[in-house]
Amino acid sequence: MSVRVGIVGVGVMGSDHARIFAAQVPGAAVQAIYDADPARAKSVAEEVGAATVFGDALALIRDASVDAVLVASPDQTHKEFTLAAIAAGKPVLCEKPLAPTPAECLEVTAAETRRGHRLVQIGYMRRFDPSYVEMKSGLGSGRFGAALMLHCIHRNVAAPDWFDSKMAVSNSAVHEFDIARWLLDAELAGITVFRPKLAQGGSPGAPVYMVLESAKGQLVTIEVFIDASYGYDVRGELVCERGTIALRAPLRIETNAELIQGTAYPADWRPRFADAYRLQAQAWIKAIARGAAAQDSNAGASAWDGYAAAAVAEAGLLALAEGRRVEIRLADRPALYR
Ligand code: ISE
């Protein structure tokens, strides 16, 4: 029997998830769709063969025909819909970020803790990206010695008007906060944020450079440059005692013409992380099909991980505003997430 997925929000990411569930995830069926724009909901539902279009997200979440919920609505609505899924006792895959502030994320971990088992996974999909997975297993092999530093670069083609340096921390760098905690198996303990002086004026997507320390004393550097123009480019290099492990973006061809050898960049994150999104969706459905215990040990990011990334972002925003190093303090981790 298929896991019947209800999708809340079918903008850029929600419609992408809908297509992945419909075409690439054995054991899943896109059952229901909600979007604030009814015409968009209808058109995606037709495209993926969803049975029902809902005019109300909460009604979709509660409906008996929906087994599991994917939340891809605007960021500020994630918490409400995730809490509704927990109240309905349904597994929920919530796009990042879980909520705009760590305090709101803790409302979700509290609700889930009261329920007694994990229902929430956060869409920090890089944990499923084959290159990051190999980086982690390389580190685990012991061949390179202990991890000393992680260098991260995160560049997008262009920033929308509403995307400023604060969002570079809270919306983009959160991926690096999550992957650094996951790779290093350590919490992040402090953050300092720098910005280069711009030649003139400055654009909303001007680069932001962060230096963090982990609780184990490793250094993490993160450049986020949302207006980088040339392509979507995510790089990472883990520097260890006896060698380094660097990510290679998936590439299928190299071109040679006009005296130039070239490889292409994708325009955004969807092609770069296509494998990660697919593997994340497959793992989520598999864990749901296997039952509650499988969800407790799911490889994906938990609500606690969503909280931790938000806590680092909040400290980063303070560091950016005040031009100083800010210590990152986390709440006590409930037993459910240990
Ligand atoms: C966007 O929201 C994402 O999640 C992308 O993965 C990231 O690369 C981009 O910078 C964010 O704005």
Image (cartoon, helix red, strand yellow):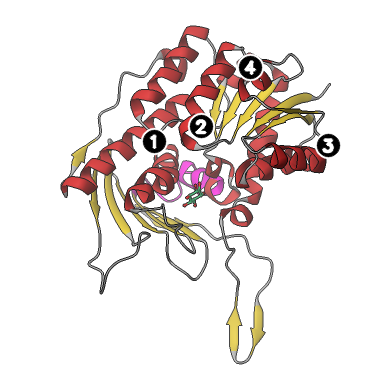
Q: Reading the chain from its start, which is encountered first: label 4 or label 1?
A: 4
Q: Which residue is mark 3?
A: 49
Contact check, label 1 and label 2, Cβ < 8 Å:
yes
Find residue 309 and name its label: 1
Indicate left or right for 310 with 23 as reference: left
Indicate left or right for 207 with 134 as reference: left
Q: Residues within 10 Å of mark 3 (few under 14, many from 20)?
A: some
Estimate the spatial distance between the alpha carbons at disc 3 and disc 4, rounded to whole Å.
22 Å
Q: Which residues are magenta?
A: 133-148
Contact check, label 4 and label 1, Cβ < 8 Å:
no
Contact check, label 3 and label 4, Cβ < 8 Å:
no
Estimate the spatial distance between the alpha carbons at disc 1 and disc 2, rounded to whole Å.
10 Å
Q: Reading the chain from its start, which is encountered first: label 3 or label 2?
A: 3
In the rendered image, residue 29, in percent from the top left (x then y), is placed at: 79, 30
Estimate the spatial distance between the alpha carbons at disc 3 and disc 2, rounded to whole Å.
29 Å
Give SS at disc 4.
loop
Say which amino acid is labelled 1. Answer: Ala
